[in-house]
Amino acid sequence: EPEVTQTPSHQVTQMGQEVILRCVPISNHLYFYWYRQILGQKVEFLVSFYNNEISEKSEIFDDQFSVERPDGSNFTLKIRSTKLEDSAMYFCAAGGAGKSSYNEQFFGPGTRLTVL
Amino acid sequence: QKEVEQNSGPLSVPEGAIASLNCTYSDRGSQSFFWYRQYSGKSPELIMFIYSNGDKEDGRFTAQLNKASQYVSLLIRDSQPSDSATYLCAVLTGTASKLTFGTGTRLQVTL
C-alpha cells in the first residue's frame, strides 16, 4: 500500500538556522498538507498545497515558512529562521485521490524538529 | 474559531468491552468527519470517516454522526490492549479541505 514518507525522522538545529523538511506524498493524490504537533498538544494545520500552489494557510504559517514541490514528487517545508517554539513533530499528509469526495488524508511518519 | 472538542481521558475499559469515544464540533457547515488513532510518538493513522447522519461500521469500529447535535462518536467493540492509544477526532473544513483536530481521547484497555 502506498505510503507517505518523510525525511529526516529527527532534525536538531540551532535557533536562527534554516531547516528543510522533506516529504514524498502518495503519487496519485492531489492535495498535500503540512501539520504540526507540539508535544502534548493537538495536531495543527499549517498549509495545504494543490496544483503547485498554496490553497490555504493558517496563522502559524507566517513569512518564515514556505513550501514547494519542485520536481513533482518531493514536497518540502522550509523554515527560514527557526525559533525555539518551532520545536514540534511535523507531519506531511496527502489526500484527494480523485475518486474520493471526502478527502481522507494519510499522514507520513513525521519529522521531529528540535530547536536549541 | 472552529473548534473540535474531545474529553482528554484517560478512558479506561477492560479487555473485551466496548469503548465509546465522543467528539463535538462547532462548525455546522462541516461535511466530513474522521477518526484517527495515534500511538505515542507516532503519526495519526486513519481509522474511519463518516459524512452521513447515522452509523457506519468497519470491523470492530462503528462511527456515529448526528449533525443536528454536532456530535460524532466512535465505538470500539471487543476492545484489545493493542487499541490503547489516543483517538483523534478531525473535521474537514474550508475549501482546501484542511482537518481541524480535537485534542484526542486517551484510551487504556486493561487486561
Image (cartoon, rainbow, N blue to C red):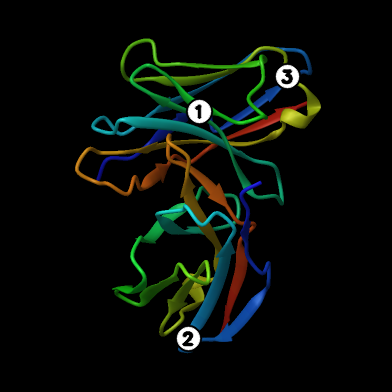
* Three-letter amino acid code at the position of disc 2: Ile
Q: Amino acid at mark 3?
A: Thr
Q: Position of residue A16 (x, y in %)?
A: 77, 13
| Chain of the residue under the numbered disc 3 shown in the image | A
Dot 3: few (<14), some (14–19), or many (≥20) neighbours within 10 Å? many
Pointer 2 residue: B18
Q: CA distance from mark 2 to mark 1?
A: 39 Å
Which quadrant would residue B84 be assigned to in this image? bottom right
Q: Is residue B101 above or below residue A69?
A: below
* Badge 3 and badge 1 in a common chain: yes
> Image check: A1 left or right of A93?
left
Side (left or right) of B5 relative to A99: right
Q: Quadrant of residue A4?
A: top left
- Residues B24 and A76: in front is B24
Give the residue pinned by disc 3: A82
What's the residue at 42%, 21% (across, down)?
A: A75
**Horizontal and vertical percent position of residue B38:** 53, 57
For disc 1, the neighbor class at 10 Å (few under 14, some 14 to 19, many from 20) is some
Residue A27 at x, y = what percent?
26, 30
At horizontal 62% and vertical 68% (from top left) the residue drawn is B106
Q: Secondary structure at mark 2?
A: loop
Q: Which mark is residue A56?
A: 1
Q: Quadrant of the N terminus of chain A?
A: top left
